[in-house]
Amino acid sequence: MAAVLDGLHPDTAVRLEAGQDCICRNCPNRGTKCPNAAVYDSRVLALCGLRTGQVLPWGQLQEAVRRRIVRTGRLASVCGDCEWADLCRAKSYRMTGV
């Protein structure tokens, strides 16, 4: 995840998907049909008012996540049951600037 985040800049165009993507690359469950990737992504999209297939600047996605999920305390409702949740919570400042 860190390598992907390091390559993103506020104006980098990102295509929104719900499912396994480059962030999932090093997950030990990659290659299996991971039900969580699509569920977590769909929750983020819904809470941020976005849709699958939409393309927008990384900075705009960051702001939407910061404003509608992190600052409102909804991170646990998105992916709190994930085995990586503690790591992501500790590192969420990298993605959201919080």
Image (cartoon, rainbow, N blue to C red):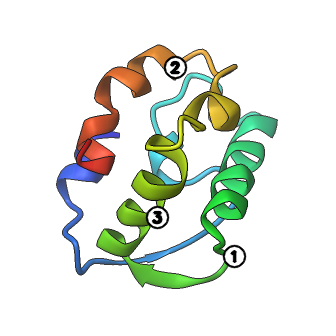
Q: Residues within 10 Å of mark 1 (few under 14, many from 20)?
A: some
Residue 98 drawn at (x, y percent)? 26, 41
Tag 3 secondary structure: helix
Residue 2 drawn at (x, y percent)? 26, 39
Q: Residues within 10 Å of mark 2 (few under 14, many from 20)?
A: few
The residue that disc 3 covers is 64
Tag 2 secondary structure: loop
Q: CA distance from mark 2 to mark 3?
A: 22 Å
The residue that disc 1 covers is 51
Looking at the image, is mark 2 or mark 1 earlier in the sequence? 1
- Figure disc tally: 3
For the N terminus, which image quadrant?
top left
Query: Is residue 65 depicted above or below 34 in this figure?
Result: below
Residue 36 drawn at (x, y percent)? 74, 36
Looking at the image, is mark 1 or mark 3 earlier in the sequence? 1
Farthest-out residue, front? 72
Looking at the image, is mark 2 or mark 3 earlier in the sequence? 3
The residue that disc 2 covers is 84
